[in-house]
Amino acid sequence: DTAVSQTPKYLVTQMGNDKSIKCEQNLGHDTMYWYKQDSKKFLKIMFSYNNKELIINETVPNRFSPKSPDKAHLNLHINSLELGDSAVYFCASSQGFGRNNEKLFFGSGTQLSVL
Amino acid sequence: AQSVAQPEDQVNVAEGNPLTVKCTYSVSGNPYLFWYVQYPNRGLQFLLKYITGDNLVKGSYGFEAEFNKSQTSFHLKKPSALVSDSALYFCAVRDAGKSTFGDGTTLTVKP
């Protein structure tokens, strides 16, 4: 069983398009995250949701809109895709928000290529 | 604001030799420190964490890390490296529910 699953694994699209990445966790965790890993492998947090409520928004362009229909799902919708959006996007989860002793569980990533 | 630094982009060791991957941190309160490993085309996997207590923390796959408060360091170590340990390693600090990652260190273990 995959604890944190993302779809699709690969996404190739044209500039200007709108696309979504889906994430689901079956761990019963309350908190979910989106991270972006750029071409240099640097990993930066984008968003964090706790029980469907937005907690962290790291000055991400408003073309990126996360949606959490329930605490097991956190989807990422991206409008008007730009070349600079090309990266690997990772979904992650943890048991609860604000608990610093908790590890993150990561999905396997979605490689987004904007042409 | 919290931060971590991994001063080495790349670490190369021979199989069977000990390895060290370095990490230093900056945080205003108590440090909650983690190491994660990323294999090619995979997500990050948790290796170990320091919360409190013993300065030497043991984790998965024979890895351990030494917390040093005076040097604000949390170096990852393994007594005998395996070729299969070759991967990208991230140090992270967690504060107020937010994990901040270092820039990563690529470990290459040669046979």
Image (tube, coloured by chain):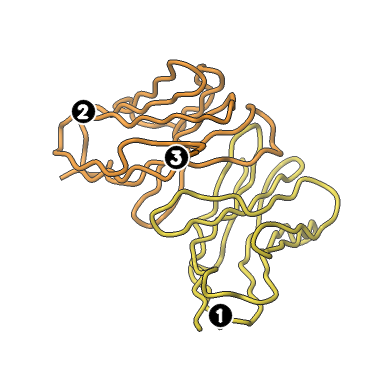
Chain colours: A orange, B yellow
SS label for mark 1: strand
Residues at marks 1 and 3 on the same chain = no
Q: Which residue is mark 1?
A: B13
SS label for mark 2: loop
Q: Which residue is mark 3?
A: A35
Question: Does the CB distance between marks 3 and 2 fall below 8 Å?
Answer: no
Mark 3 vs mark 2, CA separation in Å: 19 Å
Disc 1 crowd rating (10 Å Cα; few below 14, some 14-19, many 20+) is some
> Closer to the observer: label 1 or label 3?
1
Pointer 3 or 2: first along the chain:
2
**Which labelled disc corresponds to residue B94?**
none
Mark 1 vs mark 3, CA separation in Å: 30 Å
> What chain does mark 1 sit on?
B
Front in this rendered view, residue A28 or B54: A28
A105 sits left or right of A15 in the view:
right
Disc 2 crowd rating (10 Å Cα; few below 14, some 14-19, many 20+) is some
Mark 1 vs mark 2, CA separation in Å: 45 Å
- Which residue lies at the image location 72% right of the left edge and 61% below the top edge? B65
Q: Is residue B54 above or below residue A14?
A: below
Question: Does the CB distance between marks 1 and 3 fall below 8 Å?
Answer: no
Residue A24, image x, y percentages: 44, 29
Q: Amino acid at mark 2?
A: Asp
- Which residue lies at the image location 38% right of the left edge and 57% below the top edge? A40
Q: Which residue is mark 2?
A: A18
Residue B4, image x, y percentages: 60, 53
SS label for mark 3: strand
Q: Quadrant of residue A62?
A: top left
Q: Amino acid at mark 3?
A: Tyr
- Which residue lies at the image location 68% right of the left edge and 53% below the top edge? B48
Q: Is residue A61 above or below residue A2?
A: above
* Image quarter hosting the C terminus of chain A: top left
